Image (tube, grey):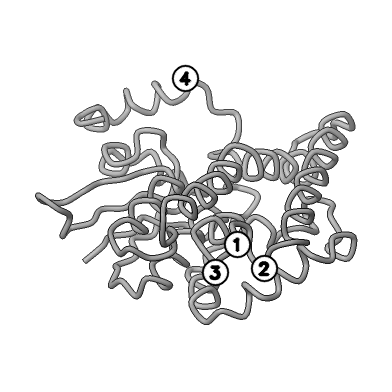
Amino acid sequence: MIDLYYFPSPNGMKVAIMLEECELEYNVIPVDIGRGEQFAPEFLRLSPNNKIPALIDQEGEGGPIELFESGAILLYLAEKTGRLIGRDRRARVEILKWLFWQVGGLGPMAGQAHHFRAFAPERVDYGIRRYTDEVNRLYGVMNRQLSTAEYLAGEYSIADIACWPWIVPHERQGQNLGDFPALRRWFETVRERPAVQRGFVLGNERQMDQEGYRFLYGQTAATVEERLRRNPAAREGG
């Protein structure tokens, strides 16, 4: 059995979709990041970066295996099952290029666009332009790639699973899929997969509210240390 520590954000959704695609049995353990549950001692021992998702494979080789970081989890599950990671070394290399492109670019830049466009306590025009434009550029990168390939790495893979949830909130990012026809075709194709649909709806009743944003933004080393001082057990195993 796999334990998935989860909130329905794009990064959480990636892993839910992957588990569904691989037909693995899993148990969802909700982590309400809008109420500070990511700072609970038991969660910090598993995910020292106090971010979701995290995962424990209770039947891992040699005993339970603990992971955090969505890209690492996708790669682990692909290797565990032999699925969605390519049939040979060349295919694997193509998939990993796009996986790391997502975790290093699309996700962080789209997240900043979300913040400055929707959640910043004050309007910062430069931040809005900077990240909206950068996400637009990244959409263009995907659109060019998908103009000559059905999926990002040629065949459906963890690269598509990593990227798709970050395109779901394209309107929040200030993007129009009509400007990117190949990307839109890919987005709609992936959306029709039954496993994607099951992973997408998982936990959607747990939505962020305005109160929750104070737990997500403005963290510093000092504020996290203060939370650890209030919960000394959180340091154990971190």
Secondary structure type for disc 1: loop
In the drawing, what numbered circle is on residue 204? Answer: 3
**Residue at 64% from the left image edge and 55% from the top image edge:** 166
The outermost residue toward the top is: 222
N-terminal of the two: label 1 or label 3?
Answer: 1
Check the image and report above or below for 113 versus 208.
above
Q: Sequence order check: which comes first, mark 2 or mark 4?
A: 2
Picture layout, residue 201 above or below residue 71: below
Q: Nearer the viewer, mark 4 or mark 1?
A: 1
Give the foreground label among 1 and 3: 1
| Image coordinates for residue 40, horizontal then vertical, percent | 33, 41
- Report the residue at 57% width, 55% height from top: 10
Spot occupied by residue 111 in the image (x, y as percentages of width and height): 66, 43
Q: For marks 3 and 2, give the CA distance.
A: 29 Å
Q: Position of residue 199 (x, y in %)?
A: 49, 71
Residue at x 54% of width, y 28% of height: 219
**Residue drawn at the location 60% of the way across and 35% of the way down:** 217
Q: Which mark is residue 131?
A: none
Q: Quadrant of the N terminus?
A: bottom left
Up/down of 65 relative to 188, above or below: above
Foreground: disc 2 or disc 4: 2
The answer to which of marks 3 and 2 sits earlier in the sequence is 2
Q: Confirm or deny contact between disc 2 and disc 1 (CB under 8 A).
A: yes
Question: Dot 4, crowdedness within 10 Å: few (<14), some or many (≥20)?
Answer: few
Q: Which residue is mark 4?
A: 221
Which of discs 3 and 2 lies nearer the camera? The answer is 2
